[in-house]
Amino acid sequence: MTPADTRIAVVGAGLAGMTVAGLLQRAGFPVAVYEQAPFFARIGAGIILSANAIKVLRRLDLEAKLVATAIAPAAFVSRAWDTGATTYRLDFDVEAEARFGAPFLNVHRADLHKVLETALTPGSLHFGHSLVGLEQRADHMRLTFGSGQTAVADIVIGADGIRSVVREFLFGAEPPRYTGRIAQRAIFPTGRILGGPIDDCTKWWGEDRHILSYFMTSRRDEVYLMGAVPAPPWEHEETSRPGSRDDFIAAFAHFHPDLRRILEAAQEVNIWPICDRPRNDTWSTGNVVLMGDACHAVRPYMAAGGVSAIEDAAILARCIARFGSPAEAFRCYEATRIPRVAEVQRISIENSWMHHDAAVDWFFGYDACSAPLTEPR
Ligand SMILES: Cc1cc2nc3c(=O)[nH]c(=O)nc-3n(C[C@H](O)[C@H](O)[C@H](O)COP(=O)(O)OP(=O)(O)OC[C@H]3O[C@@H](n4cnc5c(N)ncnc54)[C@H](O)[C@@H]3O)c2cc1C
């Protein structure tokens, strides 16, 4: 498996797909990325990128661009829904940056995508390519897209998210698991909030619900709110739909006034079903391998799904570059990633991360670009 003659097809241009494609291209592999969407839409949502993700994106020379686009929040603060008491605080100061090896950045997802796109070889990202067929031919894989177009590759990486079609080809159709909660999301200008300044990044913990509020730009001019609340089974076709501002405010009406005054500023609200997948320890078959939400979708309660997808990218790229065969590469990738991701899955189900004093170095201090690979047995 020499880089130049190993053609790699990445299905899905999300965080996982874009990062692995950029890293493999830098290692000399010809990589094509196939994305179903006709272009990147400006989805109304933010994302928290912890230091362990930034250390990977740094390898793509994206750190400075992200710092210019995103906000490095002063701290992450956990507060009790009723008293407003701080139950945990992690300051992101110079000491923390040295301790974890990179800054923490909160960013608008669309801005993150724009930055990630700059890491790819021009012409290697193909929009409007929705994978509908995947076949093993004598010595290559053949991909078929909804448009009727086809492509060939030696390795196929399924980075196509929680409803992965590549996963379906490997293991059959299996819908994601609805967790009994929806996410209510809103983005609005900071100027709409009455009263004094607000903190950069706060998670408010209730008994059966929580809500996160943070800025997404260093100008602190846009606020992102994401509440997770119990809800009946999701019976809509779409995976996101308009919600109601009144319902959002009502869901947190009993919370502390510091939160309520931020919530009152919300305008448009969107709702999403919160889904995950049970742990599954098979991430590859033959020349096809999964990464990110396609193989380990988690509940968004640790802000670690996207970060884990970025870590996957670093480990998978290293394994493909190091081993002579896809089988060996994928065994090493699985052996290295599965135990760590399993811990992220466990904590995300528990929804306990940084609620109270927490040991966080194992997660934030990790550098997927230099951490030891686990030799497959
Ligand atoms: C409410 C909420 C908040 C979250 N907050 C955070 C956070 O703060 N920090 C964090 O790290 N994570 C967070 N996450 C999790 C994070 O969003 C996901 O884990 C992450 O997006 C997974 O990246 P991915 O690249 O694997 O999949 P995706 O981002 O879903 O990307 C998959 C891509 O594949 C494409 N695709 C799908 N099917 C096909 C097909 N057939 N053919 C071609 N292309 C296809 C899709 O269009 C998409 O572009 C949150 C999730 C939710 C729901």
Image (cartoon, rainbow, N blue to C red):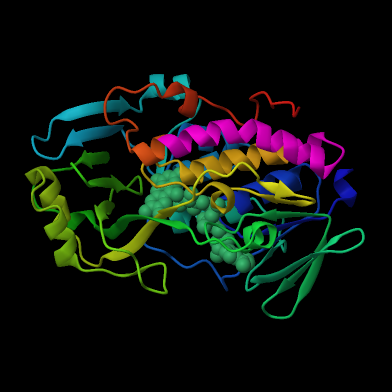
Instruction: From the viewer's side, name the closer residue of 201 and 1.
Output: 1
Q: Position of residue 260 (x, y in %)?
A: 11, 50
Q: At x 37% / y 73%, what residue is drawn? A: 236
**Quadrant occupied by the N terminus:** top right
Q: Is residue 360 magenta?
A: no
| Side (left or right) of 353 relative to 123 | left
Instruction: From the viewer's side, name the closer residue of 281 and 101.
Output: 281
Instruction: From the viewer's side, name the closer residue of 30 and 306.
Output: 306
| Side (left or right) of 355 relative to 145 | left
Residue 107 in view of the camera: no
| Side (left or right) of 349 relative to 193 | right
Instruction: From the viewer's side, name the closer residue of 198 and 49.
Output: 49
Q: Compared to 290, does 268 lie above or below?
A: below
Q: How many marks?
A: 0
Q: Give the farthest residue toward the bottom.
A: 148
Can you tell which quarter of the image residue 336 is in?
top right
Q: At x 42% / y 74%, what residue is drawn? A: 237
Q: At x 63% / y 57%, what residue is drawn? A: 167
Q: Position of residue 330 (x, y in %)?
A: 74, 41
Q: Position of residue 222 (x, y in %)?
A: 29, 54
Q: Is residue 337 magenta?
A: yes
Residue 89 in view of the camera: yes
**Quadrant occupied by the C terminus:** top right
| Side (left or right) of 355 relative to 169 | left
Q: Position of residue 337 (x, y in %)?
A: 61, 35
Q: Main secondary structure of the magenta part?
A: helix
Q: At x 24% / y 33%, what residue is drawn? A: 78
Q: Compared to 218, does 318 lie above or below?
A: above
Magenta highlight range: 319-346
